[in-house]
Amino acid sequence: MNDLGDILGSLMTGLIRARQAADLQTAALAEMYKDNPLLEGLSVPRVRIPEVTIDLPLIIENHEEGTDGQFNEPTRVVEATSTRLKNTLANSNIKLSANFQKAFADNAKLRLAEVHKSNGVVSREVVSRTMQDAFVDTLKKTNTDISAQDKLALVRDIRSEAGLAAVAKPSIPARILTNVRTADVKDKTTGNSVVRLKITLSEEGVEWVSQTNESGGVNRTLSPE
């Protein structure tokens, strides 16, 4: 049996690999055309598959209920993050007072308690972002000034440690277990009872876009082509 999500993921991944193979071949052809005086003036052939429709018969074998995840207690997350913060301050020679660190811990506990009350999905990113917001908010409330570089380094370590300490038990999503083996589909179903998955996959490309930032470096982001 296979999870329906795994099957859909494999179909989409296969289409991506097909596009990759085609682009690699196009790049190789472009090099060959460039070096051949008889071909250099011609357009390089490129094949794309903008849309694929798949009609897949399958058997639904079972359904597994998911389980809810659990956040770690706010105190544990704050303790782990505060320890990481102290180590980063010592190793980087950044000065933040003990009063600031206590104010940050208290702020973070309050914010994490609100996260615990919500019924949203248990996510490491939620906890990391909450700790980051608590740190930035504490900087403002205590009128603490640090350089942008130091702030970036501290936020990075706070987010990292908070994410590691965030989840006591991860969520397990519900699963639909299916069987797509042709022989089993033929033997266990009839033409009127077989389940058919009809899915259309549309290809959308992305490309790297480079921009020069204020400090003279280069930022590269993926954007739709």
Image (spheres, rainbow, N blue to C red):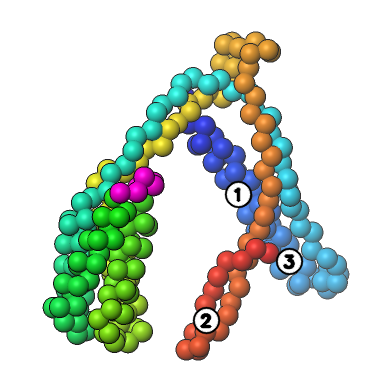
How many residues crowd mark 1 within 10 Å: few (<14), some (14–19), many (20+)? few
Q: How many numbered badges does the structure rendering display?
A: 3
Q: Which residue is mark 2?
A: 218
Q: Nearer the viewer, mark 3 or mark 1?
A: 1
Work out whether residue 1 or residue 32 is closer to the camera in this orientation and state it. Answer: 1
In the rendering, at what x and y percent does residue 168 appear?
Answer: 24, 46
In the rendering, at what x and y percent does residue 47 appear?
Answer: 76, 53
Q: Name above or below for residue 50 compared with residue 175.
A: below
Label 1, label 2: how far apart the Cα atoms are: 29 Å
Q: Is residue 222 left or right of residue 87?
A: right
Element on which disc 3 rests: helix
Q: Please give the range of residues in magenta.
A: 117-122
Tell me if residue 135 can be seen: yes
For this orientation, the residue located farthest to the left is 98
Element on which disc 2 rests: strand
Whether residues under marks 3 and 1 lie with C-beta atoms below 8 angstroms apart, the answer is: no
Tell me if residue 84 can be seen: no
Q: Which residue is mark 3?
A: 30
- The image quadrant that residue 57 belongs to is top right
Q: Nearer the viewer, mark 2 or mark 3?
A: 2
Label 3, label 1: how far apart the Cα atoms are: 20 Å
Q: Quadrant of the C terminus?
A: bottom right
Does the stretch in magenta take in 163?
no
Who's the residue at 20% across and 67% down the image?
A: 105
- The image quadrant that residue 33 belongs to is bottom right
Q: Which mark is residue 17?
A: 1
At label 1, the amino acid type is Arg
Going from the N terminus, do you reach mark 3 or mark 1 first?
Answer: 1
Who's the residue at 69% across and 47% down the image?
A: 202
How many residues crowd mark 2 within 10 Å: few (<14), some (14–19), many (20+)? few
Work out whether residue 32 or residue 151 is closer to the camera in this orientation and state it. Answer: 151
